[in-house]
Amino acid sequence: MTVIASYIYRNGKRAEEVALQSQSFVTRDGEFVWIGLAEPTSDEMDSLKMMFGLHPLAVEDAMNGQQVPKVDVYGDQLFVVIKTAHLEGDKIAYGETCIFVGKHHLISVRHGSAKSHKGLREQLEHSPQLLEHGPDYVLHGIIDFVVDGYLPMVETMEDRVLELEKHVLISFLEREQIRRIFRMRRQVIKFQRVLGPMSEVVGKLTHLDLPCVDENSKPFFRDVHDHVRRAESVVGGLRDIITSVFEASNLLEQQRQGTITRQLAAWAAILAVPTAIAGIYGMNFEHMPELGTEYGYYVVLTVIVVVCGILYSRFRKAGWL
């Protein structure tokens, strides 16, 4: 799967399909080309470089597919890299979308992204009054599409963490559940490292004077910037929740262990009484008091029962039993 869609838009409406070629592509005022690719070949990228005068370094980065989110300026063109994210079990899987933006073209190159741009393209085509403004509005649409996928993913992880929190209050965490908490914590930390550069990218598009980004489009990027910051806030809260779940688990486990230790200590103290008395009379000395007493055996049993009963009552009252 390489070229997904390649169309020229005239006055905000799709006109005709554009084929890749090895020569410069000419557009008129009121027109721009939107080309979407997924896992492109080097030949396809070479054709696009010839058609739209893409910078070789930007083409190399787009083929690499392992860039951090960034905004680079090459003459009168922009090269934007953004990170996509989706859940695979408890793991966050990342993809990358590289976007070449010129005055009359926008080229998106996807690597490892789970969601295609087909729905986004259809949605934007239903708003020709926005598309006619040019590629910067498409750039906003793509970034907004990617960022809007962050919050549902984070909320899903938050629900899973809250389920673990409920389990902590009922019983001990098992080894696999503890491993799961640490796995989720690592995933959240990695995601925070993605959100920081993403916020910088959208912040630059919002506040800096960049080629191909019209002043009228900046409020749209400002809205996306708010979404990124909200995701950062939720992720920070999720990290705190994961930490608190683990700390609560440790505290409750220590409390349960302390309770068990007190119970064992109380029973050991109670059992020490008959053990001590039986040990004394088990030494078999010839001259010991009460050995010849007719009711000595019953007296000793009574003393053991009474002392053990008193100890049990005191430990019970103190909450140890």
Image (cartoon, helix red, strand yellow):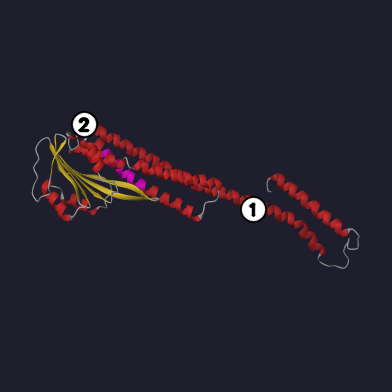
Alpha carbon distance from label 1 to label 2: 69 Å
Mark before the other along the chain sequence, 1 or 2: 2
Q: Position of residue 267 (x, y in %)?
A: 70, 54
Secondary structure of residue under mark 1: helix
Place residue 221 in its image quadrant. Answer: top left
User: Foreground residue, 154 or 118?
Assistant: 118
State the extent of the magenta-drawn residues as a range.
Answer: 191-204
Q: Residue 102 carries which label?
A: none
Vertical relation: 40 (above or below) 196: below
The residue beneath circle 1 is 261
Packing grade of label 2 (10 A; few <14, some 14-19, many >=20) is few
- Residue appearing at x 15%, y 52% in the figure: 44
As drawn, is 250 to the left or to the right of 290? left
The residue beneath circle 2 is 216
Question: Looking at numbered disc 1 in the image, what kind of residue is underneath it?
Answer: Thr
Characterize the magenta stretch by its predominant secondary structure. helix
As drawn, is 254 to the left or to the right of 115? right
As drawn, is 176 to the left or to the right of 219? right
Q: Position of residue 108 (x, y in %)?
A: 21, 46
Picture mark count: 2
Secondary structure of residue under mark 2: helix
